[in-house]
Each structure stands twice: as C-alpha cells, then as structure tokens.
Image: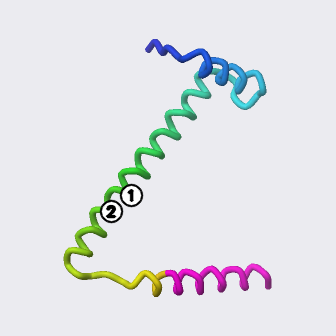
Amino acid sequence: MNVNFKPEQEQFIQSQISSGQFNSIDELMNEAVKLLEQRVHRLEEVKRKITLGTEQIKEGRVTDGELVFERLQSKIQAIAEENQE
C-alpha cells in the first residue's frame, strides 16, 4: 500500500518518530488506524443511541431534563465524597 501525506502531516509523523513517541512509521500507522477504528465505533454507538432516543421520544417515553441533571449531580457528588474518604 502506498500512502501520500501532505507535507505538514509528513513533518508531524517524522517528529513523532524522532521524539521517540513511535519507533517506526508502521507503529505510528497501526496506532492511527486503531484510533480511527475506535472513533468509527464510538460514532456508530452515538448514532445508535440517537436513533433509540428518537424512537423513545416518539413513543412519549421521556424524562424531564431537570430531573436527569439533578440525578447526575447527585451521582457526581456521591463519587466525590467517596474519593475524599
């Protein structure tokens, strides 16, 4: 496979290898592809959740936003208190 990069991308890649962040272009590209795969999977999951949420809204299955944020604040507060102990 032959890949052509823009000059600024090539410079960035070389700087990552020179700094020791990666040992080779292959290692860098493997990491880049892994991150791209993760991004694609997260995007698919977000789209799935949006579809599910849209269906729930159409069916009238909704929760008041204020209530959601109150619950979230309570959970955050409980976690913060646990971490202080």
Q: How is the image coloured?
A: rainbow
49 sits left or right of 32 in the view: left
Q: Which amino acid does label 2 sit on?
A: Ile
| Residue drawn at point x = 60 percent, y = 15 percent | 7
The percent coordinates of residue 27 (x first, y second) are 61, 27
Q: In which quarter of the image is the N terminus?
A: top left
Element class at badge 2: helix
**Foreground residue among 58 and 4:** 58
Relative to 14, is 66 above or below?
below
| Residue drawn at point x = 78 percent, y = 26 percent | 19
18 sits left or right of 12 in the view: right
Q: Do the residues labelled 1 and 2 touch (CB within 8 Å)?
A: yes
Q: Residue 83 carries which label?
A: none
Q: Mark 1 points at which residue?
A: 46
| Residue drawn at point x = 28 percent, y = 67 percent | 52
Whole-angstrom CA distance, mark 1 to mark 2, is: 6 Å
Q: What residue type is labelled 1?
A: Val
| Residue drawn at point x = 62 percent, y = 20 percent | 8
Packing grade of label 2 (10 A; few <14, some 14-19, many >=20) is: few
The percent coordinates of residue 79 (x first, y second) are 66, 80
Q: Is 77 one of the magenta-colored residues?
A: yes
Element class at badge 1: helix
What stretch of residues is rendered in magenta?
69-85
Relative to 25, is 43 above or below?
below
The percent coordinates of residue 72 (x first, y second) are 54, 81
Magenta stretch, overall SS: helix
Relative to 57, is 74 above or below?
below
Q: Name the residue under label 2.
A: 50
Relative to 15, is 31 above or below?
below
Q: Is 78 one of the magenta-colored residues?
A: yes
Packing grade of label 1 (10 A; few <14, some 14-19, many >=20) is: few
Q: In which quarter of the image is the C terminus?
A: bottom right
